[in-house]
Image (cartoon, rainbow, N blue to C red):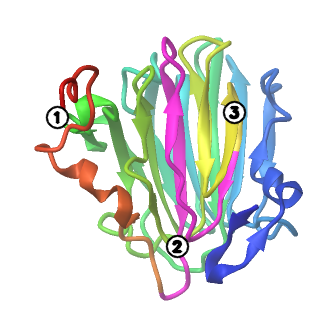
Amino acid sequence: MRNLPGGGMADSTHASAALITRHRRGFPRGLTWVTREGEAELDTGLDFGLHRMGRGESFSHRTAKETAWVLLSGQAEVELEGARASLARASLFDEAPTVVHVPVGAQVRIEATSEEVEWAVVSATNPNAFAPRIFFPRDIQDELRGKGLVQDAAVRTVRLAFDTTHRPEGAFVVGEVINSPGRWSSYPPHHHAQTELYHYRFTLPQGYGHAELGDDVYKVKQYDTVKILGGVDHPQVSAPGYGMYYLWVVRHQPGNPYRGFEFTEEHRWVLDAQQQGWKPGSTKGQ
């Protein structure tokens, strides 16, 4: 069982719908939707999918919703409202992303210029108008978190593509986490009222980690996606030897946009660099 916002409970059958594992063998060419806005169970309010392309493949699209394309790998040419840009990403773990972000009704054309190109695609209903934009790697906020705390057990890199600071009219926030092998992230445990999703990749195909959703723990593997309801703590940990990447997307609530999270009070002490926690032998003779 696990807590839901408002004090309700969900049984393990319902909770298991939060972990989407059906794509563990990878994604085919073309656009594959993983979760959709308005789903009957555990609706995040987001469309999320992966779009794989081969050299010379292209698509031209006028958006029906606010949409973001996050370049995961490869090289592509993007034409956005008449302007063109060449994009590339060679390493998911060592390079910041490029993100194409547009409102409803925008005209976008994307062409693959390398043998393999992969995009994460996020969209949501949002009538607000704003200027289409490409967020290049130089625009991405890159932050090392957890250094010097609890023996560096939660050192990770957090990348923010955009939030309400950059896109106040937008419906969601997009970012990435690079989880060091054997370390924790989204830690100490925290929560927020808005729904969220995580999509995972690992430095080796057999890599894995664990995702907590309240009191439930899920083993996450390559290409998995987790849906996170509002109000639920969601710390993560990767297995030793395996770097873990996850794309994170938070859906704003009407009148309550995401502006940050709240730490769970009983674990807040780990933010104090003077309290490093127990070490082997540290209590010997006491």
Residue receiving disc 1: 148
The foreground one among 199 and 65 is 199
Q: Does the magenta-highlighted stretch encompass residue 207?
A: no
Identify the element where label 1 is drawn: loop
Q: Earlier in the sequence, mark 3 or mark 2?
A: 3
Task: Please state which amino acid type lies under the numbered disc 1.
Answer: Gly
Residue depicted at x 82% and y 21%: 25
Q: Mark 3 points at which residue?
A: 219
Residue type at mark 3 is Lys
Residue displayed at 55% across by 85% down = 254
Q: What is the distance, in whole Å, between disc 1 and disc 2 at their CAs?
A: 32 Å
Judge the density around disc 1: few (<14), some (14-19), many (≥20) Cα neighbours within 10 Å.
some
Residue 168 appears in which quarter of the rendering? bottom left
Q: Which of 239 and 72 is in front in this view?
A: 239
Residue 252, disc: 2
x 46%, y 16%: residue:
90
- Indicate which disc residue 77 carries: none
Farthest-out residue, bottom? 255
Secondary structure beneath dot 3 equals strand
- From which residue to which does the magenta span run? 226-255
Q: Do the residues labelled 1 and 3 touch (CB within 8 Å)?
A: no
The local secondary structure at tag 2 comes to: loop
Position in image of residue 104 (x %, y %):
61, 68
Q: Can residue 77 be seen in this view?
A: no
User: Label 2 sits on what residue type?
Assistant: His
Judge whether residue 247 is colored magenta: yes
Question: What percent of the width, then of the height, locates residue 82?
Answer: 49, 50
Q: Distance between the residues labelled 1 and 3?
A: 27 Å
User: How many numbered callouts?
Assistant: 3
Point out residue 280 in the picture as x, y percentages from the top left corner.
28, 21
